[in-house]
Image (cartoon, rainbow, N blue to C red):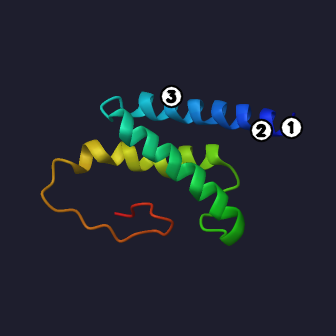
Amino acid sequence: MSKQVDHIKKKQEKDDWHTLIRQMSPGLDDQVVERLCHYVTRLEAWNRVHNLTGLDSAHDIVTQLVMPSIALQSTLSKYACVLDLGTGAGIPGV
């Protein structure tokens, strides 16, 4: 029973991330949103092992790392060249 509850909880969290990402950047196609959700899930799991970001929850990863990166997309897309210095864990650092 607990495994089923965990599965339902994870699905609800993913739906919440999907909605949040969609609201922030409605131009993203479904495949990109799914990949971002998968990235968040994997980063959260590996973050527990290696402390890649210092963030404790998937919600924090979405709101503090993914969403700012998405917000930059519309601004940066008008430039021909952008330098990504990297901040670790695959998050852009400009």
Mark seen at residue 19 = 3
Q: At x 45% / y 60%, what residue is drawn?
A: 91
Give, as a three-letter code, the residue at label 2: Asp
Provide residue 27's location: percent of width, then percent of height.
30, 31
Up the image or down, 27 lies above or below 52; here it is above
Give, as a three-letter code, the residue at label 1: Ser
Q: Mark 1 and mark 2: span between their CA atoms? A: 6 Å
Question: Which mark's residue is nearer the viewer, 3 or 1?
Answer: 1
Provide residue 23's location: percent of width, then percent of height.
43, 28
Few, some or many residues within 10 Å of mark 2 (<14, 14–19, 20+): few
Give, as a three-letter code, the residue at label 3: Thr
Up the image or down, 3 lies above or below 41; here it is above
Q: At x 63% / y 43%, what residue is drawn?
A: 59
Q: Which residue is mark 1?
A: 2
Q: Which residue is mark 2?
A: 6
Few, some or many residues within 10 Å of mark 3 (<14, 14–19, 20+): some
Q: Residue furthest right?
A: 1
Q: Are marks 1 and 2 in contact (CB under 8 Å)?
A: yes
Question: Which mark's residue is nearer the viewer, 2 or 3?
Answer: 2
Callout 1 secondary element:
helix
Q: Is residue 33 left or right of residue 64?
A: left
Q: Are marks 2 and 3 in contact (CB under 8 Å)?
A: no
Q: Is residue 15 left or right of residue 8?
A: left
Q: Mark 2 and mark 3: span between their CA atoms? A: 20 Å
Q: Is residue 63 left or right of residue 33?
A: right
Q: Residue furthest left?
A: 80
Provide residue 4's location: percent of width, then percent of height.
79, 34
Mark seen at residue 22 = none
